[in-house]
Amino acid sequence: MVQPHPLQTPAEKASLEETVLELTLRPTQWDDYVGQDKVKQNLRLIIDAARGRTEAPDHLLFYGQAGLGKTTLAYLIGKELGVTVHSTSGPALERAGDIAALLSNLEPHDILFVDEAHRLNKVVEEILYPAMESRRLHLIVGKGPSARTFSLDLPPFTIIAATTRANLLSAPLRSRFGATFRLDYYRTEDIQKILERSARILGVTMTERALNLLAGASRFTPRVANRLLKRTRDYAQVHHHTTIDEEVVKRTLELLDVDPLGLERADRELIRIIIEKFNGGPVGVRALGAALNEEPGTIEDVYEPFLMQLGFIERTPSGRVATRHAYKHLSLPLKPQLL
């Protein structure tokens, strides 16, 4: 159990407890991982084949929206293979020495998990190419005429990279992964199973209607589902409800400003801006970012994928367009061409 530092502020202690709770809800066994069935089947084949040959599996790349289970899968693969998973992230690897230190300390068959791989420094990528391809670490010591190059052999290892922006990975880096898997949004029934498991771990009782309502507002994403469940549990505790029923979920979602489809205030504001300020579109992402006071990248990474999954907006060559479903959800009059 993680013990809070005595000098931590209440906010830091609460954040630590939240992190520990989130880790507790993560699947720790392969069979506990719900959803992504096709990805799991392919990974099972890779794991069993590598284990049968007593080899390290090929390097793997996972991409998809945040919260879909990329990190969890990496750790489950490590557990299935009985090896250590070392974790880092693209922004943390600023210099060639950072990645060199990690690679040179790997034991045979270890896994190096790199989150946010699309943010890797180009210098770090140059070190990774020979390491991934031929298990050799090439380093330059010194500068100018006195600079020397030396190579270090690396043990068999596997890099598992995760990214939400696969299109930002360089082609040379992508080509060095032996298998690439896209993690899709989850089906509602899978989210319900995840919520049932999390509710058991948290020791809370939920009615069937409450479970359905919470799953419907979870944006087809396990991380969001667990976050909403924790807030619902908080509401039930503070208001002395022994069982989480439909009314408790509704009250919690109202407090969080989340509607039954999982849209938050910013999502609804984005749709409303497209409809009311830009006459339903088309409108470019930069204009949307300026109107919403958000970075265009945030709109593309955070808001758009879910709204497109719901069929509320469409991307066209001319820009983003709101669909009739978006008008209906916000109870706004349809444009004549959508009637």
Image (spheres, rainbow, N blue to C red):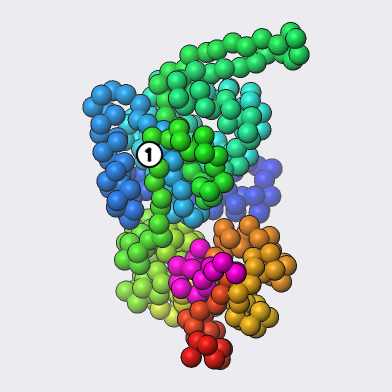
* Mark 1, other Cα within 10 Å: few <14 / some 14–19 / many ≥20: some
Residue 196: % across, % down: 34, 62
Check the image and report above or below for 140 versus 169: above
Q: Which quadrant holds residue 291?
A: bottom right
Which residue ends up furthest to the right in the rendered image? 144
Q: Residue at x 38, y 39 (%)?
A: 179
Counting the numbered discs, the total is 1
Q: Residue at x 66, y 79 (%)?
A: 278
Q: Element at badge 1? A: strand
Residue 98 is left or right of residue 78, and the answer is: right
Q: Give amino acid for label 1.
A: Ala
Residue 244 visible somewhere in the drawing:
no
Residue 7 located within the stretch drawn in magenta: no
Tag 1 residue:
179
Compared to residue 185, the image places residue 260 above or below, namely below
Expressed as whole percent of the image width and height from the top left, the position of residue 119 reads 60, 42
Magenta residues, start to end: 305-319
One can see residue 333 in this view: yes
| Res. 299 image quadrant | bottom right
Q: Position of residue 18 (x, y in %)?
A: 54, 53
- Of residue 38 and residue 85, the one placed in the foreground of this image is 38
Q: Residue furthest front?
A: 317
Q: Determine whether, in the image, residue 135 is placed left or right of residue 7.
A: left
Residue 292 lies, in percent from the top left, at 69, 70
Which residue is found at the position 68% from the left and 60% from the top?
295
Name the residue located 45 percent from the left edge and 20 percent from the top edge. 134
